[in-house]
Amino acid sequence: MDRRLMTRRHAPARTVSCDALVIGSGAGGAVAALELARAGHPTVVLEEGPRTTTAELAASAPAANLRRLYRDAGLTPILGSPVIPYGEGRCVGGSTVVNGGLLWAPPDALLDRWARVMGTTDYRAERLAGHLSTVSERLGAGEQPHGDGNADSRLLAEAADALGWRWSAARRAAPGCRHLNRCPTGCPGGAKRSMLVSYLPEAERYGAVIEPGTRAVLLRHDGRTVHRVSALGGPDGRTRIDYRPRTVFLAAGSVGSALLLQRSGIHARTAGRAMGFHVNFRLVARFADPVHAGRGTIFTAQLREFEDLGIHVMPANLTPGSLAAALAGHGPAVVNPLLADLPRVAVYTVQVRMSGRVAVRHLPGGGRLLRHRMAPYDRGLLRFALGRAARLLFRAGAVELYPPCTGVLLSERAAREFAVRADPRGWDLVCVHAMASCPMGWSALGGVCDQHGRPYGFTNLRLCDASVLPGPAGLSPQGTVMAFAHEIAARYLSSPPQVPTRRHCDSDTPS
C-alpha cells in the first residue's frame, strides 16, 4: 500500500492547515475549487501532474505534450480481451486540457433513469438546468461551425442526411477555435476553455492555491471524519506534506478517486468494484477525392442517430502519427501507401457505451490494476456500431475502410458480412471516458455516496468528479460531471454537515 511510502525515511513532513482541500483539478475539482473560493473558503487544490501554459503547448511537439500531460502517456492498460489502453489527463486542468471540448447536457431520460434506479432524485434535468447554463456560459460553449478543412465532418453530415439519420453540429467549449488540429494534446491557440484557462484561474483570483506535482497518498480518518491528508510533493515528488483540512473534496478522476478510497480503507470493497466506461474504435477511410482532413479541428459534426444505444460517430484528429496509430495492427504494406495518400484519408471514431464494467484495484507500492470483462451484449453492440458506421462512411464516398483489426472493407456489403463474423475481443479499442466507480445512490445497489457526494458514514468528505455518476453516460460526460459537481458544491455551501447513513441515498428504499 501507499502507507509504506509515508513511512519511508523522508524529511519531516510539512504541515498545511486549510479550510477546504480539493484533490484533483479536472472538471469536477475545478468546479469545487471555484465555488468554495468564491464563497470565501480558503481553498487548496492538489494536482498530481504538472502545470502548463498555452505558450508551452504551442511550443512543444504533440508527442511531447502527450507524454507530459497524460497519465502513462495515455496507455494505462485495462486488462482483458482485448487489452484496452485508457487515456486520462494528468496535469492542471485534468482531462479537459486534452479532450475534444464537447459539452453536452445529459439527456432527461438518462437522469430520470438514474433517479428511478439509484435514487438520485435531486439530479433530474430541472435541478441541473441552472448549473448546465452556468457551465455553458462560463465556457462559451456553442455549436462548432465547419472550417475550411473539415470536409470529413461535412461528408459525415451529408451522408447522415442522405440516410435520414440524425446528426448534430458539435457543441464545444472552444469559442474562437482556429482549427489547429491539436485538440487531444492541448489547444495551442488557447481557444478551448479547459479548466486550465477558465475555472482554475478564476478560483485563484478568489484566493485558491493550486499545488501541481503533489500526489495525495492517504486519507487519514476515524471512520467519520477525515482529519489529515498525507501527500508527496516538492521538486522531486518525495517531500512529505500533511494537510489538515476542515473539508475534503475528492476529484482525482474515476480511477484515482476509487484507488485513494481503497488505500484509505473507505468503502474499500465497493469503491472501484464496477466502474462504467465507453470504448472507442477507429475506422480509417480512403476517399476518391481529397478531403484534407488534417486541416480542420477535431470534429464539427457528430452522428447521434443511435445515441439511445450509447453509440456516436465523429471524425478524429488526423496527423501522420494518429493515422499510424489507428493502423497499428495492419503493418507497413497498408500503412505506407495510406501515409503517401494522406490528403484522401480521414479517420473516424466510433464511441460505444459498454454494459460491462471495469474492476479497479490498488496494488502495493502505489500501483493499480484495471480489468474488464466484455459482455456478450457489448460484443454485439460493437459489431452493430461498426456496421452502421461503415454504411455511413460508404455513403459519404469512402472507397476503402480499414477496421480496428487486420483487413480492408471495399463495400457496404463486405462491411455487413465482416460485422456479422468479427469478434471485437480482437479489435484495437481505446477508452477515454471512465465514470461511476464510486456511484451516488442506494448502497444496496452498489452506491458509495449520498446525494451530497458524501461517502456513507462520513461528514467532511465529498466526491465531486466522474466517479459519482450513477452509471455510464453514453455521451461525452464533461457537462454532466460539471453539473453534478456544481450541485454537490452548492449543497455543501448551503447546508450544515450531516452524517449520512449507509441504508439510503436520501430516501429509505428504492422506488
Image: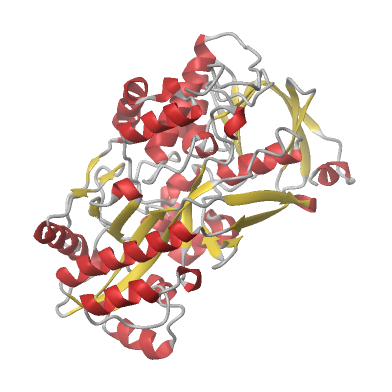
Looking at this rendering, what residue extends furthest in the bottom direction?
333
Q: Is residue 163 left or right of residue 311?
A: left
The image shows residue 326, relative to residue 332, as above or below, that is above
Residue 218 visible in the displayed image: yes
Query: Does residue 401 sit above or below 104 in this rendering?
Result: below
Which residue is pictured at 90% across the width and 46% down the height? 9
- For the point 54% across and 38% down, the residue is 467
The x, y position of residue 121, in whole percent, is 43, 21
Tell me if 70 is positioned left or right of 280 in this view.
Answer: right
Image label count: 0
Q: Nearer the viewer, residue 51 or 121?
A: 121
Q: Which residue is at the front of the view, 365 or 35? A: 365
Considering depth in this image, is 2 or 383 the residue closer to the camera?
A: 383
- On the image, the x and y values in percent for residue 77 come to 59, 62
Asked which quadrant contains residue 135, the reply is: top left
* Whether residue 298 can be seen here: no
Where is residue 137? Give x, y as percent.
29, 29
Left or right: 398 as drawn, with respect to 488? left
Q: Among all residues in the image, which is located at the extreme left?
A: 162
Colour option used = secondary structure
Please give the name of the residue rendered at 30% of the width and 26% of the height, measured from the top-left corner: 133
